[in-house]
Amino acid sequence: MKKTLLIGLALFLFHGLKAQRYYTKTGIVTFHAGTTVEDIDGINKSTTSIFDVSTGEFDFALLVNGFEFRRALMQQHFNEDYLESDKYPKSTFKGKITNISSVNFSKDGTYPVQVKGTLTIHNISKEIEVPGTFIIKNGKVSGTSTFNVALADYNISIPSLVADKLSKTAKVVVNCDYSLLK
Amino acid sequence: MKKTLKKLMIGTLLVAFAAAGYGFYLFNKKPADVRVMSASYTLSADSLVNVYNQDEKAADKKFLNQVIEIKGTVSKVVLDSATKQATVMLSTNDPLSGVTCSFYDNEASQLKNIKSGAEISVKGVCTGKLMDVVLNKCSIQH
């Protein structure tokens, strides 16, 4: 009896150790919300992300104040008027890679994946499903995704004065180089 | 009478030009260069993370968007010229969180000779805390 318990425990521990997780604290997220009148974009180079190879669970978090802009006013309007980053300092994504089993993390290649979950921006949460790509090269794992976010979905209102400068949807590009969590 | 009107018109035009010029200047103004700004607070990576662990909201009130100088031990340097990534991680006595310092991409050359375990001082803007406290627009302080 004791022996079975021990074997069970060992198996459990073994399984626990086998659960591979990858993470990054230096993920890059850019967004483009400009029009032909004005180019508006921001970059955040300290996005935290973690995913579990066996379950496909996938988390992202970034600090809204961490976006950098080319113009001072752009940054001010982004933080104070549109995203209200003092009130809502973080944006997150929490979800799953639905076809994680199709990615062979030990074989070089480009693997398309589907990501489904809850995106929270400006304190508003929405279910989204977006495509992404894992690239495995010489044992290095990187992930990218490009998708559109409708500003109105997240209660980001655009004053009519700048309506011709700011796009109603922002194109978001995610670029992460992952390391194995030891 | 006519002269006064003319003066008034010229005056108005001048003001309008000045306003337009100022507007253009504001529009094109680059974000402040943190490298030439002086730090509002100087503290160790340990104490910064400690303050955040105790009360994140209060810490944000104090440090968010402020230029701060942090002293700590390097645990990792991430350099990638393709993505313009130049980041230094500082370890703290909290094993779960440290300080992530994202550098100006043209400061990357300063990081080439920095190895894990080195003691450095970094100046940057505090943007809040995820797992780590994150500093942006960093540069090495000597």
Image: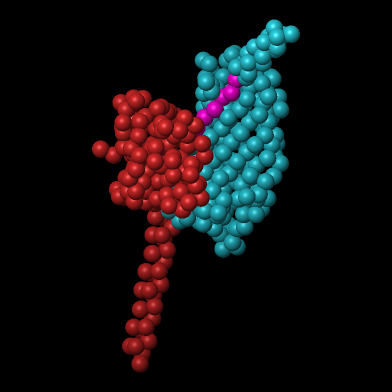
Chain colours: A cyan, B red
Residue appearing at x 25%, y 38% in the figure: B142
Horizontal and vertical percent position of residue A38? 51, 52
| The one of B84 and A35 positioned closer to us in this rendering | B84
Magenta stretch secondary structure, dominant: strand
Q: In this view, does A86 lie to the left or right of B110?
A: right
Instruction: State the extent of the magenta-drawn residues as a range.
Output: A20-26
Q: In this view, does A70 lie to the left or right of A175?
A: left
Q: In this view, does A26 lie to the left or right of B29?
A: right
Residue appearing at x 48%, y 37% in the figure: B132
Horizontal and vertical percent position of residue B136? 42, 42
Residue appearing at x 54%, y 58% in the figure: A81
Residue B92, visible in the rendered structure: yes
* Occupied quadrant, residue B94: top left
Residue that lies at the very extreme toward the right in this rendered image: A1
Quarter of the image that includes the N terminus of chain B: bottom left
Residue A105, visible in the rendered structure: no
Is B43 a magenta residue?
A: no
Q: Look at the picture and state if A105 lies above or below B81.
A: above
Residue that lies at the very extreme toward the left in this rendered image: B142
Horizontal and vertical percent position of residue A28? 51, 35
Horizontal and vertical percent position of residue A128? 70, 39
| The one of A26 and B25 positioned closer to us in this rendering | A26
Q: Look at the picture and state if B28 lies above or below B51.
A: below
Q: In this view, does B94 lie to the left or right of A150?
A: left
* Occupied quadrant, residue A5: top right
Q: Look at the picture and state if B118 lies above or below A140.
A: below
Residue appearing at x 53%, y 16% in the figure: A139
| The one of B68 and A72 positioned closer to us in this rendering | B68
